[in-house]
Image (spheres, grey):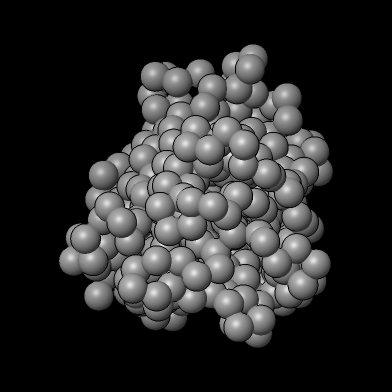
Amino acid sequence: MTLNKLFATGLLASSLVAAGSVDAAAAGGKRIAFFVSDLSNVFHQSQAVEAERYAREAYGSEVVVFDGQADSAVMTQNIDQIVAGGFDAATLHIWDAEAARPGVRDALAEGIVMTSFFSPITDTGIPTARSDEAGVSFEMGAQMARAWKDAHPDKPIVMVQLGWPNHTEVNSGRTAPFVEGVRSVDPTAENLGALDSSAGQEAAKQIIVDLLTQRPEVNLIYSEASNLTVGTMAGLSQLGRGKFEDGKPLTEIVASVDFDSVEFEQIYDPTSSLKVSMGLPPIETARGRIDLIMDVVNGQVDATSDPAEEFFYKAYTISFWTMPEADAEAWLAAQFGG
């Protein structure tokens, strides 16, 4: 199913829950609510398409996609539709776990299988599917530190992260292991910490401009989402930075998350300072989230536990230095099509 068909057929919950759909449960399958935080993101678009296809073909089940619209309040409101919409199961993607807690407990009380993606939902104990981000973040940090030391052995490493400093899973999967990776190469590297860029692309741009005006020696930047990276690179460009020459960094090296076709062009551009990104595979992630639901349905995973069980799915290091351009292009085609 193409993305255009996904939207044209009204797979999105806003129309489907109200209108109803084929009763998958009557045919032995399940009706599954599949939450994504922001359906304008290509990773989540591809997840949605694959979840719908995989659930139908592997389990005879129906998926309804709920778009969180990058709005925590919308994500929380969507939970109310799980019971009202006659769902058998849900896989959530929630930014405010505390606000989601009552709705999750209500759904569990109705016998609905509940799982989460990316973040556990407080003390509800429902199983959580996560991408194995920490290993990739560590590797990106180490690669960047080695590349900087090779190019500029006399310039100390000063690093910064742009993201969500108060988000537990972002810290454990991205921020902290990145710093560890850098310091595995250079234990003396200075870390300016994670700067709150939760307001998005324009905020990231302004943060970079302000920071590098005051601290021009910053040379390793981890931009912890692809939309932030757009702003990061724009800010660097405004300052006359963001460049490589002869495969070597002039002023900094940048890492990102959510590798896509736009980042592909930059990573393999020998003049761009964006050189590594975390590849999150939408196909494998979607299948893992659906499989986890069915494992709970089939009694292979407990519906709740204390603490909540976490299940990790592979993430990839897309790197100018270690992944040939043709391999990165093939990865993109396999995961996103085209």
Q: Is residue 143 visible?
A: yes
Q: Is residue 289 visible?
A: no
Q: Is residue 254 above or below residue 338?
A: above
Left or right, 63 with respect to 174, comes to left
In the rendered image, residue 30, in percent from the top left (x then y), is placed at 42, 43
In the rendered image, residue 152, in percent from the top left (x then y), is placed at 48, 57
In the rendered image, residue 102, in percent from the top left (x then y), is placed at 79, 36
Viewer-side residue, 64 vs 180: 180
Left or right, 333 with respect to 143, comes to left
Left or right, 192 with respect to 170, comes to right
Q: Quadrant of the N terminus?
A: bottom left
Left or right, 165 with respect to 220, comes to right
Viewer-side residue, 14 vs 172: 172
Residue appearing at x 80%, y 67% in the figure: 214
Residue appearing at x 48%, y 76% in the figure: 243
Q: Quadrant of the C terminus?
A: bottom left
Q: Is residue 136 above or below residue 125?
A: below
Give the residue at the far front of this rendering.
154
Q: Is residue 66 above or below residue 177?
A: below
In the rendered image, residue 142, in percent from the top left (x then y), is placed at 45, 42
Residue appearing at x 62%, y 71% in the figure: 232
Residue appearing at x 77%, y 43% in the figure: 166
